[in-house]
Image (cartoon, rainbow, N blue to C red):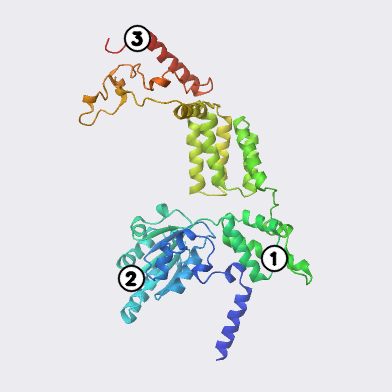
Amino acid sequence: MADDLFGAAREDRLASRAPLADRLRPRRLDDIVGQDQLIGPGKPLRVLIEADRLSSVILWGQPGTGKTTLARVIAGHTAKAFETLSAVTAGVKDVREVVARAEQRLGERGQGTILFLDEVHRFNKSQQDALLPSVESGLLTLIGATTENPYFEVNPPLLSRSTLFRLEPLDDAASRALIAKALEAEGASIDDEAADHLAARSNGDGRHTLTSLEVAVTLARGRSEGAPVVVSLADAEAALGTKALRYGRDDHYDVISAFIKSIRGSDANAGLYWLATMLEAGEDARFIARRLVILASEDIGEADPLSLLVATAAAQAVEYVGLPEAQLNLAQAVIHLATAPKSNRTIVAIGQARADVRDKPSSGVPAHLRDAHYQGAAKIGHGDGYDYPHDDPRGWVPQQYLPPEVADQQYYVPSSHGREREIADRMARLRQTTETSPEPGS
């Protein structure tokens, strides 16, 4: 009895001293902040958890998105036994012991077993293979958690027997909701600027948000002297070790405008400065990447076609790598786009073409360009008079492709910058060939 009393007291003291992130760890699905795409009402993962019909899953997401929290909530919803291993410290021997206990439970009580394997990517191939027979037979229901891309780090046979769920970084709204819950638990309040700063600097990591807030509350409580505890911007800055940048709604639009105009103006240094400003202020990296992809076609185009590939690759890197490392990919894209030759002829061309489509009545597709593949098309003149360019040794024939109403329009006019100079020369040679060559078939 004494041991039980001392044990209970020890647990109570440990709970009271636990970090805020552990004290606020949700016990129910409805308490989890964010991940509505997975556990919102009627969503697949929520339905499976509530029905206790969950099969093996891999939870993939950056630190602080709630993988372990979700696994613990599942433990509270299931009638199965729940075992936990960390791939950092566990080995094949530990897996075999879990399998043995699972076999015993199933044989004695008919009870299934869920194994939560944290950091599953830390298991090597042989360790993952040791799990495979038990997962395949259904003896174990695996919940694997990983911060790494499972398509690279989890053995294909194990991945193919699991359903992959990706947990997204917490957005600002989810971070603010988490901050509100924590403040209620701590009996404190917060200035709006301080809350914005904490949410913006969380990088989608709920654990980091709560850890920083706990420090900020402690600082605010230390100077409150019995007054209500209010976390100030200074407290938030001290907790995070970073100064808050002024970056409101107006700044969002002003800074992105300066960013785009700097790159358009071929000033790589200014482009990098405004990129750094946005990153320091917690701007969404995906928004920055989207603007670079647009700029690559709007302000550079065929003057340097590689720019679109570079910008698109940077956007993919933001999704695959994430911040802070993806800042390197964004910076490389900024430097490439800023130093590339510039041309706005793509946006001018599509703008003029769309204006003509809207404003000028068209007689439609010329007969020689219409589809002639289906039966009877030739009888109504479809394809009649079409010249196949590949039959000409030049790989090109002079031929009208526009409707007659706009036949003389030239939407794309290459500039003299970068690769567009080569395009302009080639188009001029083609026009000269048109003027000096006889018509095909003559």
Label disc, if present, on residue 139 of the rendered structure: 2
As drawn, the residue found furthest toward the bottom would be 1
**Residue drawn at the location 54% of the way across and 34% of the way down:** 295
Q: Is residue 91 visible?
A: no
* Quadrant (top left/top right/bottom left/bottom right) for the C terminus: top left
Q: Position of residue 129 (x, y in %)?
A: 35, 61
| Left or right: 219 in relation to 288 | right
Label disc, if present, on residue 88 of the rendered structure: none
Up-down relation of residue 274 to residue 362 (above or below): below
**Labels 1 and 3 touching (C-beta < 8 A):** no
Callout 2 secondary element:
loop
Mark 3 surroundings within 10 Å by alpha-carbon count, few (fewer than 14), some (14 through 19), many (20 or more): few
According to the image, label 1 marks what residue? 189
**Residue drawn at the location 79% of the way across and 70% of the way down:** 225
Mark 2 surroundings within 10 Å by alpha-carbon count, few (fewer than 14), some (14 through 19), many (20 or more): some
Instruction: Looking at the picture, tell me which residue is in the foreground, 259 or 110.
Output: 259
Three-letter amino acid code of the residue under disc 1:
Ser
Three-letter amino acid code of the residue under disc 3:
Ser
